[in-house]
């Protein structure tokens, strides 16, 4: 039950961030999804698809983790692993939103 609550909390925060970014980038039809190391955008996706990708992936990971039974002796690691994955996914989403903002600002968007 606690795992589901942790997953739902992280999922809700990630959805809220995506909705907030959707209004922030409402003037953009497509958002960057991948960059080369030099900062050049490799490909774009429709705005809503781009913003929903990371939260959808994270919620799937949280659901799988919450429903998977740990190996005997590893029960004490389940909550720390769930918290680690939650903060990792949240950090990835924040990094993505930062990179999108930086790219659009650089390109005059």
Image (cartoon, grey):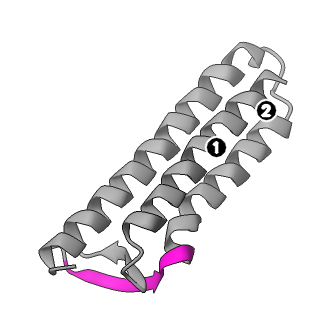
Question: Residue at coordinates 41% horizontally, 43% vertically from top-left?
Answer: 91
Say above or below: 1 vs 64.
Answer: above
The x, y position of residue 12, in whole percent, is: 64, 43
Q: Determine whether the residue tagged by mark 1 lies in a helix, strand or loop.
A: helix
The x, y position of residue 100, in whole percent, is: 31, 67
Would you say residue 4 is visible in this rendering?
A: yes
Residue 68: assigned label: none
Horizontal side of 74 relative to 106 (left or right) equals right
Question: Residue at coordinates 79% horizontally, 32% vertically from top-left?
Answer: 4
The x, y position of residue 13, in whole percent, is: 56, 42
Question: Residue at coordinates 71% horizontally, 23% vertically from top-left?
Answer: 78
Horizontal side of 98 relative to 40 (left or right) equals right
Question: Residue at coordinates 28% horizontally, 62% vertically from top-left?
Answer: 99
Q: Quadrant of residue 9?
A: top right
Magenta stretch encompasses residue 42: yes
Q: Quadrant of the C terminus?
A: bottom left
Magenta highlight: main SS: strand
State the extent of the magenta-drawn residues as a range.
40-48
Q: Determine whether the residue tagged by mark 2 lies in a helix, strand or loop.
A: helix
Disc 2 crowd, CA 10 A, few/some/many (<14, 14-19, 20+): some
Earlier in the chain: of badge 2 and badge 1, it is: 2
Q: Quadrant of the N terminus?
A: top right
Disc 1 crowd, CA 10 A, few/some/many (<14, 14-19, 20+): some
Q: Which residue is mark 1?
A: 12
Horizontal side of 84 relative to 108 (left or right) equals right
Residue 4: assigned label: 2
Q: Quadrant of residue 86?
A: top right
């Amino acid at each position: 039950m606690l795992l589901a609550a942790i997953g739902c909390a992280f999922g809700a925060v990630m959805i809220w961030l995506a909705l907030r970014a959707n209004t922030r980038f409402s003037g953009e039809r497509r958002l960057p999804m991948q960059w080369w190391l030099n900062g050049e955008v490799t490909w774009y996706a429709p705005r809503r698809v781009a913003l929903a990708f990371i939260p959808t992936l994270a919620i799937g990971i949280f659901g799988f983790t919450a429903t998977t039974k740990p190996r005997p002796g590893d029960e004490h690691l389940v909550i720390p692993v769930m918290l680690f994955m939650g903060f990792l996914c949240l950090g990835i989403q924040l990094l993505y939103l930062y990179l999108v903002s930086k790219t659009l600002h650089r390109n005059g968007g």
